[in-house]
Image (tube, rainbow, N blue to C red):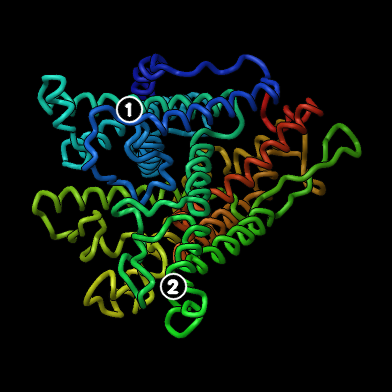
Amino acid sequence: MAETGLKDRIAPFLSKLPAVKRPEKHVHFQKKLMWTLGILVLYFVLSNISVFGLSAASQDLLGAYRAYFAGAQGSIILLGIGPIVMASIVLQLLVGAELIPLDTTDPKDQAIFQGLQKLMVFVMIVVEALPQIYGGFLLPDPAIAATLGVSTGIIQLLIFAQVALGGVLILYMDEIVSKWGIGSGVSLFIVAGIAQALVGGIFNWNPPYPGQAMGLNVDIAGLGARENLPIGIIFRWEWLLNNIGLSQLLTGENLIVLLYQGEILALLATIIIFLLIVYVESTRIEIPLAHAAVRGARGKFPVKLIYASVLPMILVRSLQATLEMVGLLLYRNGITFLGTFNQYNQPVDGLMFYINPINGLSDWVPQLAALNYPGIQLWQIALHVFTDAFILIAGGILFAIFWVETTGMGASRVARQIQKSGMQIPGFRRNEQVIEKVVSRYIPKVTVIGGAFVGFLTLLSSLFGILGAVSGTGMLLAVSITYQLYEKLASEQLMEMHPLMRKFLGEE
């Protein structure tokens, strides 16, 4: 009774939070497409609006995680989807541990959950912005302060206001896409950011800014330091051919180094991971369905191998990013028991080093790792790889289970959806409990297997690196989300052609 009373008290407050109005009737496919494209254009515009008053000496605290936080360094949306993801993690953990008693299968509790999540996003915007501003990462420009005749403290407040505004805009842009567009804004922004990085990894002729290159930053065999080479693979090959020569590149030690510094292994890894993810995305178990009233009307309910999608990987990496941010802030204040960091804010030892994601060959090939981490031992490299593998696989399973249960993809919700649509499983009674028992043979197992497999794919792609300094996680997310977006577009077109399908898919 006390829990019910608390829910009744907070529900009116949560309902007053600003929200995008849900469409009252079906939104035509073309209109959904226009909303989605419009938000995508707005995202790119915002990613090119710099934070006023920000010093060029500022550092990107989330640089290593930029691919799946979907923000842009130095722009007003530098937080990206970080606050949304962290709010989701915190709330799912609290609900999963029953510290917040909510039944997400109940529409009333689901509305409270969504309201709490939005409130938590506002909190996370503040929690993620303030440490970066007052922790010495987002620095105010003294010249601008002097020109305006104000203190740097005022400029810091202006920076916070702009970053917070960007975080709020991302939140409501995501809500617009979810309600009026196709898919989700979070997924859309991730794909947009990673696609931009991949294009840069092919065509960008500029060298990376200090700290951007996540791999080897030293000269090997006279090929030139990696941080001085162009980012784009085309211009990198041109630089190597003009300055070293093909005959020298294809001999002895240079050939091995060319595979790494010339991004050839990264190119091969990008192609292989792309094909592998597309294949895995198409692997599914199909449960046959038949309409109870319309004889001959049949269908299938697909249970994909990656049933919980790859979004749980965002939750895993976001948790790592938060822990690393805490370690870095402690290190900046002279507390080093969690580890120390180099000038590029990358951990080099301690717990922070081991939980830091693997980012290519230079993190696990002994000869290359020794150049980035002088004195590193073989057991330390092995422990680093094992720790990242455990975090990805175990975290993938855990968050996949949470994702399925909190987004209505569990066996009970699926059974209810099939029952309401008038369908049944051939050979079984048309009963919700019976349907739930049948689908329970597949969904829980596939959720666990899929979560572990996504973690393994992420590790595999992270070990070899991806073009454009995109992490393995980023590549996995981009390909998988793009494939799911393609399926969503096909589904939307099908529903436009056959309006009765909307009822079965829960669109009306």
For the residues labelled 1 and 2, the Cα–Cα distance comes to 53 Å
Camera sees residue 221: yes
Q: Quadrant of residue 299?
A: top right
- In this picture, residue 55 sits left or right of residue 392: left
Image point (12%, 25%), residue name: 146
Q: Position of residue 14 (x, y in %)?
A: 38, 19
Q: Amino acid at mark 1?
A: Phe
State the residue position of label 2. 244
Q: The residue tagged with tag 1: helix, strand or loop?
A: helix
Q: Residues within 10 Å of mark 2 (few under 14, many from 20)?
A: some
Q: The residue tagged with tag 2: helix, strand or loop?
A: loop
Q: Position of residue 425 (x, y in %)?
A: 77, 45
Q: Position of residue 121 (x, y in %)?
A: 35, 31
Image point (41%, 32%), residue name: 48
Residue placed farthest to the bottom in the image? 252
State the residue position of label 1. 122
Instruction: Judge depth for marks 1 and 2 and give the one in front.
Output: 2
Q: Is residue 93 above or below residue 122?
A: below
Q: Amino acid at mark 2?
A: Ile
Image point (25%, 76%), residue name: 376
Residue placed farthest to the right in the image? 296
Quadrant of the image for the C terminus? Answer: top right
